[in-house]
Amino acid sequence: MSVTRRQILARTGASVAGIAFTGALADLFAGSPAAAEPLGGYGPLVPDPDGLLDLPAGFSYRVLSREGERLRSGEGPVPSRFDGMGAFPAANGALHLVRNHENRSDARLGVPAVTGLTYDPGAKGGCTVLGLGPDGEVLEGAAGERVGIAGTAVNCAGGATPWRTWLTCEETEDKAGTKGYGKDHGFVFEVDPADPRRTGAVPLTALGRFAHEAVAVDPYTGVVYETEDAFEHPFGLFYRFLPLMPLGGTGSLRAGGTLQAMRVPGVPDLSVVREPGTVFRRVEWVPVPDPQAAGTPIRFQDFGPGGITHAQKLEGCYWGGTCVYFVSSYARTSDGSGATHFGQVWKYEPLNRRLTLAVVFGPDTDVRLPGESPDNICLAPTGGLMVCEDGGGAQHVFGVNRSGEVYAVARGRQDIGKPGAPEWGEFAGVTFSPDGTTMFVNCYTPGTTFAVTGPWR
């Protein structure tokens, strides 16, 4: 069953909708505690008198960092375009947040170049690391906010590793000699939040060169799953990387491995699959002919008589239970996709190579109402799934529980539009503290990192 935006929330301030999802919705919560899930949501969103973030009653937020402020390390201003983010435990109850900056060559506030942490001085993307004390406050000095990696480009999403590092993804295929770049881009880089200089600025070239979006690491085998958010037809692929040194800790991914792309026999485009619960039991993995895309982008390469399976706008990717989940944020026939949809969530089971369409959003019915274009997603330690919206109109963080209820957790209030034409920046990087007491989330622009606390159930 498709879920329309009007079904999802009857009005922007509503707390929950009586939706009965069909298909494999419950599978989305593998590895998430059932007993704690917030049945009924948390109630209507309360307008924020400060005009930053609307939350349910009983919840509050702290602004941890904003673009343009000074990095506490003194390395320069806080860069712009906040995107994917991960939270990692540190010593003595402290916490590290690693935050991506999706800066292109024209960015107003690039990530400051730091010796030993800069890949390409001509690029303005990268990551910053925030250190939070046991009280949740940002620490002073370099321990509180610093550059994690610089000189990369269009750092969109990424993912955490089982050995507590962050894989940051370049969402670009630009090569040296274009847009002011001195080196090729389109790689994954590893950032150690506790000591960024230990990982430096070394591209993990074996994971391929393409417009990366997100990654998820199988904690049992060390296999890395990757989404590609290509902007032109033919669209991106879903990949897996088989490392030579699985689960070897920091630096193991530099040892190389094999990059493969997913083929669903008889399905050249995932957008044509419409019914949640549809299962494909013969997924194949095909070696990528040229992972470095030296002459031809990977999605254009020859994968043999069976071809390869594409999907438009592949975004979030996460691991739950024994499965990996990935998002196609939308597809449009006008862009070249085989069908139009307003969001899919797919589940892949490595043990039996089975792929299932778990959830479909859409069609769009009213841009004033939420519920389209799911982007970053994560499992909440308190139960349920958190989804960052990236569509038109108001922008929300939604929760979804096993009963199929979709409820608003937060709504952005920072208007970046023109007079008479309001516009709100998307949410990105939703993640939780390891103890489940705090939700961290970014507003993409103006770049703002929030810490949200309250009666999480």
Image: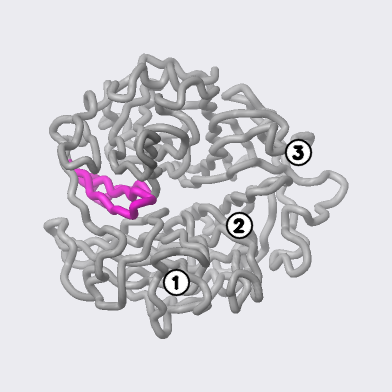
- Indicate the position of residue 28 as horizontal and vertical percent values: 45, 33
Contact, mark 3 vs mark 2 (Cβ under 8 Å): no
* Chief SS of the magenta region: strand
- Indicate the position of residue 364 as horizontal and vertical percent values: 52, 24
Name the side, left or right, on which 440 lies relative to 274: left
Quadrant into which the N terminus falls: top right
Count of numbered tags:
3
Q: Which residue is mark 2?
A: 211
Q: Nearer the viewer, residue 286 or 96?
A: 96
Residue most extreme to the bottom: 115
Mark 1 surroundings within 10 Å by alpha-carbon count, few (fewer than 14), some (14 through 19), many (20 or more): some
Rendered residue at 61%/51% (across/down): 228
Q: Secondary structure at mark 3?
A: loop
Quadrant into which the C terminus falls: top left
Q: Secondary structure at mark 1?
A: loop
Residue most extreme to the front: 419
Rendered residue at 32%/30% (across/down): 34
Mark yes or no: residue 425 visible: yes
Q: Nearer the viewer, residue 217 or 327?
A: 327
Q: Which mark is residue 250?
A: 1
Magenta span: 429-453
Q: Earlier in the sequence, mark 3 or mark 2?
A: 2
In whole angstroms, how far apart are the C-alphas of marks 2 and 1?
A: 23 Å
Q: In the picture shown, does residue 334 fall above or below 233?
A: above
Rendered residue at 34%/32% (across/down): 399
Mark 3 or 2, closer to the camera = 2
Q: Which residue is mark 3?
A: 268
- Indicate the position of residue 78 as horizontal and vertical percent values: 31, 66
Mark 1 or 3, closer to the camera = 3
204 part of magenta stretch = no
Q: Secondary structure at mark 2?
A: loop
